[in-house]
Image (cartoon, rainbow, N blue to C red):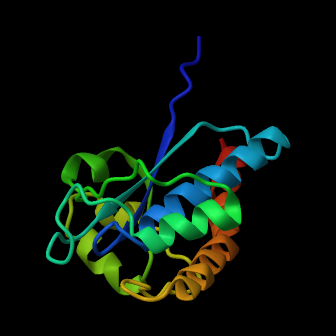
Amino acid sequence: SIILMSKLIIFVCISNSCRSPMAEYLMRYLLENEKSAGRISGEYTIISRALSNAYEPEGSPASSQGVTVLNEVYGIDMTMHRSKMLNEKDVSEAFLIIPVKRELGEYISRFPGGRDRLFFLSRDISDPWHQPVTVFRDCAKLILSLLPEVLEKCKKIESSN
């Protein structure tokens, strides 16, 4: 029998409090829709991680503005999120590691096998940290507009298997 291995996708930003958690939760939301419509068949586990704990300590909740936007605009509950640092185990188990900005790829590449797992979005997502909720709304909209690129990558890999 074939054991369905879930493919791990990791979104990465600086503190894992704004962009990467929004990307994680929006990607889960998008995958659910794609699966129920029968457009994607693989099993995926979506998580998000931090590269630094200098601005927010590990274990911090997602920013309140991000929580508000995801709840009000998309009906997504992000209150359970707690920030976590990217580690070697995450990297070794990952199928794709997606930094919110191209320049962050450099830090991910320092992990063994990190470079091979990198997937870059076509646009950088600028940091809404400590900005008003309207900035977070625009940020979420941009993230959602870029996530189909990740879906396409998943579908391409599914069709080549």
Of residues 61 and 151, the one nearer the viewer is: 61
Q: Residue at x 54, y 67 (%)?
A: 68
> Quadrant where the N terminus lies?
top right
* Residue 50 x, y percent position in the rendering: 28, 65
The residue nearer to you, when weighing 123 against 72, is 72
- Left or right of 49 on screen, residue 150: right
Residue 52 to residue 132: above or below: above
Quadrant containing the C terminus in the rendered view = top right
Q: Is residue 98 visible?
A: no
- Identity of the residue drawn at 60% across and 36% down: 43
Q: Is residue 4 left or right of residue 82?
A: right
Q: Is residue 88 above or below residue 125?
A: above
Along the horizontal axis of the image, is 7 left or right of 112?
Answer: right
Q: How many marks?
A: 0
Q: Is residue 53 above or below residue 94?
A: below
Q: Residue furthest top?
A: 1
Residue at x 62% of width, y 85% of height: 138
The x and y percentages for residue 132 are 48, 88
Q: On the image, which quarter does residue 58 sit in?
A: bottom left
Residue 156 appears in the picture as rendered? yes
**Residue 101: image x %, image y %?**
42, 82
Q: Residue at x 28, y 71 (%)?
A: 15
Observer-nearest residue: 130 or 58?
Answer: 130
Q: Quadrant of residue 60?
A: bottom left
* Image spot of residue 87 (x, y percent): 21, 54
- As drawn, 50 above or below 30: below
